[in-house]
Each structure stands twice: as structure tokens, then as C-alpha cells.
Amino acid sequence: MDSREEGEPQRVDAIEQARADREAIDWLIRLDEEPEAPALRVAFAAWLAGSPVNVQAWSDTAHASDAISLAFAPSPKVVSIEQALKRRRQRRSLARRLFVGSVGIAAACIALWAGPRLLTNLRADHIAPTGEVRTYHLADGTLVKLAPGGALAVDYLGGQRHVRRLQGIAYFDVKHDASRPFQIGASGTTITVLGTAFEVQAHEDGVGVAVRRGRVRVACDTAAPVAILSVGHTVDMACGAGTALRAGTPPERIASWIDGQYVATDRPILDVVDALRPWYRGVIFARGEGLETRRVTGVYDLRHPQEALSALAAAHHVRVTRVTPWMTIVTPD
């Protein structure tokens, strides 16, 4: 059997699964609107019996509906079985509407998230897709590693060595050339090196730089401050505010994402969630009091974001609700 023939059943299975998923959501809505309709229940039973794929799709859909009810619905004190059943039906009805609405919301969020990334990627020379670290060798021998979601534009014209970090996190191991300083433009700053290894990460209001080997100069394009960093030194520079927050870290921890690890040392829970987002093939919503203030220390496996979120939940009183395979909700417990 050739490779084409071997791959064909997988494509058919994927189409069948997508069909069953759509029909399961439709049945969820119809049964919620007419829960006591005998003809509808007979038709639903026939649909379930029609295929094992239908059974699995219904199980997944019902589970997601229940998950939303647990994540969002209140849990009032019940005083009778009748009240318990009534409130459970009400909660499931709310969950079904939230579930169906969440499909559209998530699709819109993904479109909003993917749109700007698509424009950035069109301007980039090198990119790294979701969940993958990409390695590139530039024309002068400089090694670049892009974290998932990273994008980079290169300009080596006129004898210069200049790159623009358009998006995400990047690690550079720069080939030494005293006659041509290597420069990176990111978030209103210029980072200049001769030969060194370091990490660059842009924030909303500035840029973070951490040096693993050598020395790096970080300067705002328009005014002070300026920072000279050596091995194990970091700086978070916000040019608009005129601040440069320095710190130290073990050099071996710098760019640990290359090995699929996020090392959190007294960091807010939200920082861990943000670190996992580029590795998650979908959307993670994180909302609720305490996520920005409650702090954690630990090592998290970026290559398995769902398992990392579960570990975070188990240790730090966080609720993680997987609504669909491509949408997860993180809330305080």
C-alpha cells in the first residue's frame, strides 16, 4: 500500500469527526429548546446509534457543556432533590448557551490573534510557528533561535549587520566581527554587540535583555537610559518611562525555553500562563482576582502546555477548564 493510500483513511476520519462535532452542537441546542419532545428524542437516539463517531462527539460536547457550567455557574445551597434537579437543568441550559457562544467567541479571538501575526509574518524573514522553536543561521554565521510565535527581519545590506525583532522572544549567538557591530532594533531600543550570546524579549512598554555570554549594550533610540550588561545580568528597559530595572540570574537559566522549559522564580501566576500561550495550539483565557498577584516558583514543561496548566492548578489553587481542544479557561479557585 502506498503512502497516499495509507493517508486517505485519516483524511476521511477527520472529515467525519468534524461533521459529528457540528451535529453534536446542533443536537445540544435542539434538545435544550425542546427537552420533552418525543419525536426529537427518537431522532437523537437514532443519530447516536448511527456511528461510534457520533457517540464520541456527543460525549465531548456534553463534557464541555458541563465544564462551562462548573466554571461559570454559581453553586447555591440546595434544600431538596426537586430543587437540585431544577437548578442542575438551569445550570446545564446556561452551560449549553455559553458553550455554543464560546465556539463563535473563540473563533473570533483566534481571527483577531492571527490577523496581526499574519501581517507581521509577511514582513519577516524568519518565523517560528506555534509550539515550535526554530533555528536559523544568518549570512555571517550568527545563530538565531526563535521561540514559538517569534518573527525576525534581517538587513545585512551596505556592510551592516542589523536585524529587527518584530515579534516574540529570540536568542542570539553572535559571530564576532569587530568591524561590523551586530545590532538589534526592538521596542524603541537598539541592542549592540560584538560577539556574545543573549536573549531578547519585547514587552508592551519596553524590552528585556538577558546575557548568557559576553557583553551587550542596550540603549533607547531617543534618550537615556543606557545599560551595559555582562554575563548573568538582565535588564527590563522602558524607554517611555525612562527606567531600566537590572537584575541577575544564573546564565544557564537564560533562554531555558530552547529546551522546552519555563523556570518561574517568584513570578505571578499570569506570567506562567503568558509563557505557555505561544506553545498552546488555541486560545487561553486567564481572568480573575489574584492571577496577577499570587506568585509561584517552579519549572513548567512548555512542550505540554495543558499538562503544565494542570500542574499549576494542582499546586496553586487555580481552576483550569478545557472547553474545547482549542480553548482553555484559567480562573482562581
Image (cartoon, rainbow, N blue to C red):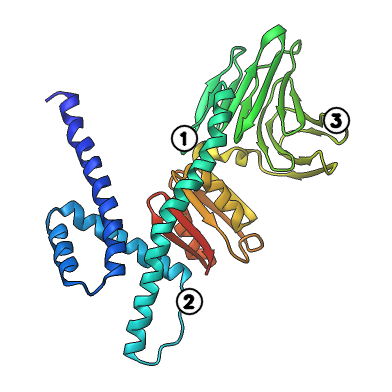
Q: How far apart are marks 2 and 1 (CA)?
A: 39 Å
In terms of depth relative to the viewer, which is nearer, 299 or 149? Answer: 149
Q: Which residue does the numbered mark 1 point to in the structure image?
A: 132
Residue 258, image x, y percentages = 53, 36
Instruction: Tell me the amino acid under the disc marked 2.
Output: Pro
For the N terminus, the image quarter is: top left
Residue 310, image x, y percentages = 45, 59
Q: Which residue does the numbered mark 2 point to in the structure image?
A: 74
Looking at marks 3 and 2 on the same chain, the residue that comes earlier in the sequence is marked by 2
Q: Which residue does the numbered mark 3 point to in the structure image?
A: 222
Task: Confirm whether residue 283 shows in the render.
Answer: yes
In terms of depth relative to the viewer, which is nearer, 241 or 121? Answer: 121
Q: Residue furthest toward the right?
A: 224
Looking at marks 2 and 1 on the same chain, the residue that comes earlier in the sequence is marked by 2
Q: How crowded is mark 3: few (under 14 residues within 10 Å), some or many (20 or more)?
A: few
Locate residue 295 relative to residue 327 in the image: left or right.
Answer: right
Which residue corresponds to the image point at 14% horizontal and 53% vertical from the top-left?
51
Q: Residues within 10 Å of mark 2 (few under 14, many from 20)?
A: few
Residue 55, image x, y percentages = 20, 58
Asked if 177 appears above or below 16 in the picture, the reply is: above
Which residue corresponds to the image point at 50% horizontal and 28% vertical from the top-left?
134
**Residues at circles 3 and 1 in contact by the CB criterion of under 8 Å:** no
Looking at marks 3 and 1 on the same chain, the residue that comes earlier in the sequence is marked by 1
Which residue corresponds to the image point at 59% horizontal and 37% vertical from the top-left?
255
Mark whose residue sits in front, 3 or 1: 3
Q: How far apart are marks 3 and 1 (CA)?
A: 35 Å
Specify the quadrant of the image occupied by residue 174.
top right
Q: Is disc 1 placed on a helix, strand or loop?
A: loop
